[in-house]
Image (cartoon, rainbow, N blue to C red):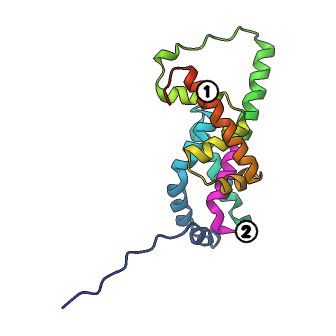
Amino acid sequence: MVQPVRSPEKPVLDGDLVRQCKLGNTESFRVLYRRHQHKVRSTLFQLCGASSLDDLVQETFLRAWKGLPKLRTPDYFATWLYRIAWNVASDKRREFAKTADLHAKLNPDPPSPAPDLMDLHYRDLVQRGLDRLSFEHRSVLVLHDLEDVPQKQVAEVLGIPVGTVKSRLFHARSIVRQYLENEGVNL
């Protein structure tokens, strides 16, 4: 007897998981966390570096959990989550800037010399290239080029027009490309 062909199970969509979360299903949020934590972690690392990365990821998902009841379009969970991660990164950078300003006022030490670039790994060079960008340009480049978020979704996450995303992406790529070429990287 021939067995009927079983269709593979469809993956549960984010929107369905969000709707289940809103009904009190905490396991659905665990699934969302497992599904998105690596991209959130990567995005936050690119925007803020390794310092307190675990705390930033935790803060992002805590804000998401608390904000789920207010999420009107569950099917856009990923875009909404990226926006939360971007806000967490923005808050961290503002906090860091205030701390750095206070430290500079209290302790005017000369800046330490940059490490020898020849000893740095390629990834460190890319990170240094990213560090040369404004937070706005860096955000667009990280989300689009490193996290593969489409330009339209980047615009939604950052609350800017798609044309602005394209412009910032062009300028950010140019700055990083120029930096890498100046460091001897053949592109």
Asked if the magenta segment contains residue 78, the reply would be yes
The magenta segment: 72-88
Three-letter code, disc 2:
Arg
| Mark 2 secondary-structure assignment | loop
Q: Residue furthest toward the bottom?
A: 1
Magenta stretch, main secondary structure, is helix
Image x and y of residue 149, in percent: 60, 52
Q: Nearer the viewer, mark 2 or mark 1?
A: 1
Say which mark, if any, is on residue 178: 1
Q: Who's the residue at 56% across and 50% down the image?
A: 148
Q: Are marks 2 and 1 in contact (CB under 8 Å)?
A: no
Q: Along the polypeptide, which appears first: circle 2 or circle 1?
A: 2
| Mark 1 secondary-structure assignment | helix
Viewer-closest of 22 and 171: 171
Three-letter code, disc 1:
Gln
Image x and y of residue 134, in percent: 72, 33
